[in-house]
Amino acid sequence: MGRDKTFLVAIDDSEATLRTVSYVAETLGPQKGFHIVLLHVLPPIPPELLEFGGSEDPKTEERLDEQLKNEQAQWVAQAQQSAEPLMEKVKALFLQGGISADRITTVFAESIHRPEYVRELLETAHNQQCGTIVVGRKSYQKFQEMFHHHVGEELVQKGAGFAIWVVE
């Protein structure tokens, strides 16, 4: 699939996501020759799963490190499982719009600290060879907009080489 025919669609549990998915499904519809990558950024891994106090004994240190990695992997797997109903709902909207399931891929981004959404979107778009990044934008009153930074605005600034769709 060509880069220009692959769309990365950012997914969260907001109304903006539902509007975005509906817009993309309506725009692309049953056309052939494109692929959609759904990206959901998982919440950050809890601080208590990031590091341990360590040990002076190398074997104990290695065992504790392995245990911590296993706990992190379990947490990520549980977070992905928790996001599955959302992903299924979004896929169903695409299917209703005439987009077949074989043209949809789901991807999860893991973050250790506060998610850096723009970096995650750009890295995933690059890794998945997407030509277009699609994000939803929540509607804000004019006063709120003065103080609100939006992912779409930053994507437009930093997303050289990608088409950026910001759906209102």
Image: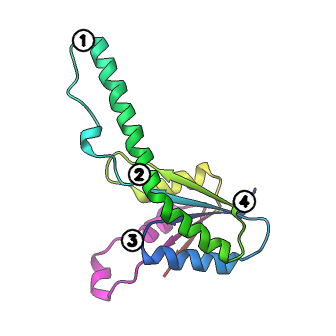
Is 25 part of what is drawn in magenta?
A: no
Q: In what quadrant of the picture does the N terminus appear?
A: bottom right
Give the residue pinned by disc 1. 57
Which residue occupies the foreground of this view, 10 or 150? Answer: 10
Rate crowding at label 4 as few (under 14), some (14 to 19) or many (20 or more) other CA atoms within 10 Å.
few
What's the residue type where badge 2 is placed? Answer: Ala
Rate crowding at label 1 as few (under 14), some (14 to 19) or many (20 or more) other CA atoms within 10 Å.
few
How much space separates mark 3 and mark 1, taking CA atoms?
47 Å
What's the residue type where badge 1 is placed? Answer: Asp
In primary-sequence order, the first of circles 2 and 1 is 1
Q: Secondary structure at mark 3?
A: loop
Quick check: 52 above or below 167? above
Which residue occupies the foreground of this view, 92 or 61? Answer: 92
Give the residue pinned by disc 2. 79
In primary-sequence order, the first of circles 4 and 2 is 2
The label on residue 84 is none
- Left or right relative to 102: residue 15: left
- Magenta span of residues: 132-160
Q: Quadrant of residue 97?
A: bottom right
Is there any visible trace of residue 37 in the rendered image?
yes
Give the residue pinned by disc 3. 150
What's the residue type where badge 4 is placed? Answer: Asp
